Image (cartoon, rainbow, N blue to C red):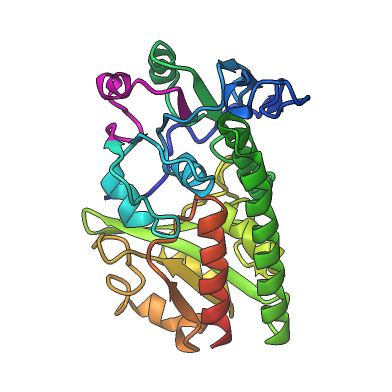
Amino acid sequence: MRRLPRTAPLAAAAALLLAACGTTEPAADDAPKASSRPVTLTDASGAKVELDGPATKVVGTEWNVVEHLLSLGVEPVGVADVKGYKTWDSAVPLTHDAKDIGTRGEPSMDTVAALDPDLIVATTDLQAGAVKQLRKIAPVLEVKSADASDPVGQMLENLDLIARATGTTERAATLKKDFDAKLAEGAKALEDAGLKGAGIAFADGYVVSNQVSLRPYTSGSLIGGVNERLGLKNAWKLKGDEAYGLAATDVEGLTALGDVQFAYIGNEQDTASDPFGKELRNNSVWKSLPFVKSGDVHRLDDGIWMFGGTGSMERYVDALVAALTK
């Protein structure tokens, strides 16, 4: 099970203004209740999305939007790759019986249609043809998959847009406040430990046909953006892609890092997800790296989705701070 974002559409179109043209809150005592007020939004594709009221029966075609929905208190009726979500995102668990609508890249149109959703939430990673088909079933709200120029800001912008569509803006405000507090708490803990400004390199890796592939998370990645807000310095010199801020390297490429803190996330349910602790364990280059020799390699907790929402990033902050300050 690969937990990677689909790389083919990583060069997503530039974000368009995410603007709410309506409201879900009554303006006067005799106004309709929030649950019945029409909602009009402009999504990341520039499409106008019109709803009779805040959506309650929602389908999510990507794990990050599913996490946003769950964090907002909206249990999606349909989720792409339910098993994969439960494997890779336990920070915001999917506990109810959502219908599996197929893969993240190819949702089943028949399955989605049978759910009769009020709204389908997708990302700009989903192929245009699939989005066109989904729009024949129900309104589709596209959020920008990621933006390396402002990874944390894009994540929060997506949360806000989904909150407007589901009438959960107050919950979104609370989530953002809690997220800011967690960042401040983590930054203080690292500063108190003398780690402010310390170099960090986060990466993941996987094995295909006995070949190890490594992905550095540059400062343009969501993880990289969180690390910088914690007061850490991203040690990667490689340029990441324009959406996810991800790069590519091999074990020899790790020699450019020097003496840093190295962190990664694997998964016990995915045997190919931990080349650092398995395939590279006896590799001479890996064993010669300064951070390996000094014991500054940290495998963080399973179930933290590296491309998720506030819940996953808060869990990441806790895990990283605990690892670096132990």
Expressed as whole percent of the image width and height from the top left, the position of residue 158 reads: 60, 38
Q: Using the image, determine if residue 28 lies above or below residue 194.
A: above
Depth check, front residue: 203 or 107 = 107
Q: Using the image, determine if residue 140 lies above or below residue 270.
A: above
Horizontal arrangement in the rendering, residue 29 relative to residue 323 (left or right)? right
Depth check, front residue: 134 or 45 = 134
Expressed as whole percent of the image width and height from the top left, the position of residue 252 reads: 44, 67
Q: Using the image, determine if residue 206 lies above or below residue 134.
A: below
Q: Is residue 118 magenta?
A: yes
Q: Quadrant of residue 217?
A: bottom right
Depth check, front residue: 265 or 46 = 46
Q: Which residue is drawn at 45% across and 22% down?
A: 118
Q: Residue at x 56, y 27 (%)?
A: 54
Q: Residue at x 51, y 73 (%)?
A: 319
Q: Does the magenta stretch include residue 205?
A: no
Q: Is residue 85 visible?
A: yes
Tell me where the magenta segment starts and ends, as one range: 100-121
Q: Residue at x 65, y 60 (%)?
A: 178
Q: Using the image, determine if residue 212 lies above or below residue 45.
A: below
